[in-house]
Image: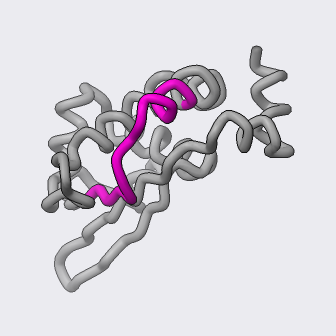
Amino acid sequence: MELHWKEIIPGDQYIVSIDGPMNEGDEKVLSFLYQPLIGPVCISLYFTLRNQVEQNRLSTEPISHYYIMNLMDMSLSEFFVARQKLEAIGLLDTYVKKGEDFRLFIYELKPPLSPSQFFSDGLLNIYLYQKI
């Protein structure tokens, strides 16, 4: 049995939370600096989650994981791995609210580092240089 089934099931609900609008610079940093490190699937998941938040809102209504799996044509295990990579690189924080008969995930999207912050980071810049 795979680990993701212990952590999440397709029927679990999630909310996406952001701290503000994304600017064009953020999109370029994600595409050209983060994508070589975590791959296009993770970046696509980040953009998809980000775009689920309506303009002038800071979070979404609860949505089933079935929705994101169908929208992105990915399995639950693929989603789980991509989510873990986003968490590991600092673009996503995940919180879980557990009830008696439900789990609600809160995906808090973090903005990417600026290019100067990225290249000043002791790990990310070295990892990028190794990848490219």
Q: Count how many numbered circles sit on residues in the image.
A: 0
Residue at 44% x, 26% y is 41
Instruction: Say whether residue 130 is magenta.
Output: no
The quadrant the C terminus occupies is top right
Give residue 58's position: percent from left, percent from top.
26, 60
Residue at 52% x, 24% y is 28
Q: Is residue 108 left or right of residue 57?
A: right
* Residue 14 in view: no
Task: Please say if 32 is above or below 78.
Answer: above
Magenta-tinted stretch: 15-29
Residue at 36% x, 34% y is 47
Give residue 17's position: percent from left, percent from top.
32, 59
Residue at 52% x, 23% y is 31
* Residue 118 in view: yes
Give residue 37's position: percent from left, percent from top.
65, 28
Give residue 111's position: percent from left, percent from top.
50, 48
Write down the quadrant of residue 35 in the picture: top right
Task: Please say if 35 is above or below 96.
Answer: above
Colour scheme in use:
one colour
Q: Which residue ends up furthest to the top in the rendered image? A: 132
Instruction: Say whether residue 19 is magenta.
Output: yes
Q: Report the front residue among 9 and 89.
A: 89
Q: Report the front residue among 97 and 27.
A: 27
